[in-house]
């Protein structure tokens, strides 16, 4: 996915949400297979976790935390006891769940399959958390943000987002990570 240099910052983040939702849906399908006794697809699960660690967290959540939220706060949207604080708290939980999923997968790779149930529980928690989180950002916080941001905020965030978009995350470009989403979706299409 190429980032439109003129797109509003909230539109860029909303587009990234759509990519994240597609991989959440793949993760859910893989977990459902395991829970039905149809095997544990460790390589695809590793790709999902890599995507969440690098695209959802290192790229997307970092844009929100380091760039968007400080601007929204400066324009009067409260952090403590307000929507920004809630979003930051949820990013922290998501980060911890991603770490746990990664560790559990390595335990399975080491030959201990007793933790697959634990993996599924953590993954289900992650899917539920992130879907609700994205819904809140799309429908509440970003809408509020677009109302309070000034045109110069939009312009400077756009430039900063483009700069982040050119970085690499764990040695991978944002486009390569988005491609990982396409790969996972074509390997595990909706039944
Ligand atoms: Fe977020
Ligand atoms: Fe987000």
Image (cartoon, rainbow, N blue to C red):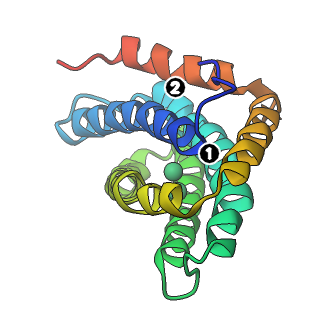
Q: Is residue 116 left or right of residue 107?
A: left
Give the percent coordinates (x, y) of residue 167: 83, 32
Give the percent coordinates (x, y) of residue 173: 75, 24
Q: Nearer the viewer, residue 146 or 90?
A: 146
Can residue 110 be seen by looking at this rendering? no
Mark 1 surroundings: few (<14), some (14-19) or many (≥20) residues within 10 A: many
Q: Is residue 2 above or below residue 104?
A: above
Q: Nearer the viewer, residue 104 or 144?
A: 144
Q: Which mark is residue 60?
A: 1
User: Which of pointers 2 and 1 indicates the residue nearer the eye?
Assistant: 1
Q: Nearer the viewer, residue 43 or 129?
A: 129
Q: Residue at x 55, y 64 (%)?
A: 148
Can residue 132 be seen by looking at this rendering? yes
Q: Residue at x 55, y 29 (%)?
A: 47
> Does the beta carbon of the residue at mark 1 sit less than 8 Å from ligand 2?
yes
Q: Which mark is residue 43?
A: 2
Residue 12, picture quadrant: top right
Q: Residue at x 47, y 40 (%)?
A: 14
Quarter the N terminus occupies = top right
Quarter the C terminus occupies = top left
């Amino acid at each position: 996915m190429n980032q439109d240099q003129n797109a509003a910052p909230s539109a860029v983040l909303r587009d990234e949400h759509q990519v994240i939702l597609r991989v959440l849906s793949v993760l859910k399908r893989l977990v459902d297979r395991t829970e039905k006794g149809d095997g544990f697809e460790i390589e695809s699960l590793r790709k999902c976790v890599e995507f969440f660690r690098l695209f959802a967290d290192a790229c997307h959540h970092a844009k929100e935390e380091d760039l968007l939220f400080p601007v929204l706060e400066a324009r009067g949207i409260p952090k403590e006891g307000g929507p920004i604080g809630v979003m930051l708290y949820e990013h922290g939980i998501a980060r911890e769940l991603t770490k746990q999923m990664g560790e559990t997968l390595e335990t399975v790779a080491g030959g201990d399959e007793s933790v697959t149930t634990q993996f599924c529980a953590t993954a289900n928690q992650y899917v539920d958390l992130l879907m609700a989180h994205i819904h809140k950002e799309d429908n509440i916080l970003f809408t509020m943000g677009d109302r309070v941001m000034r045109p110069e905020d939009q312009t400077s965030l756009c430039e900063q987002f483009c700069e982040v978009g050119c970085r690499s995350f764990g040695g991978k470009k944002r486009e390569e990570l988005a491609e990982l989403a396409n790969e996972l979706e074509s390997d595990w299409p909706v039944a």
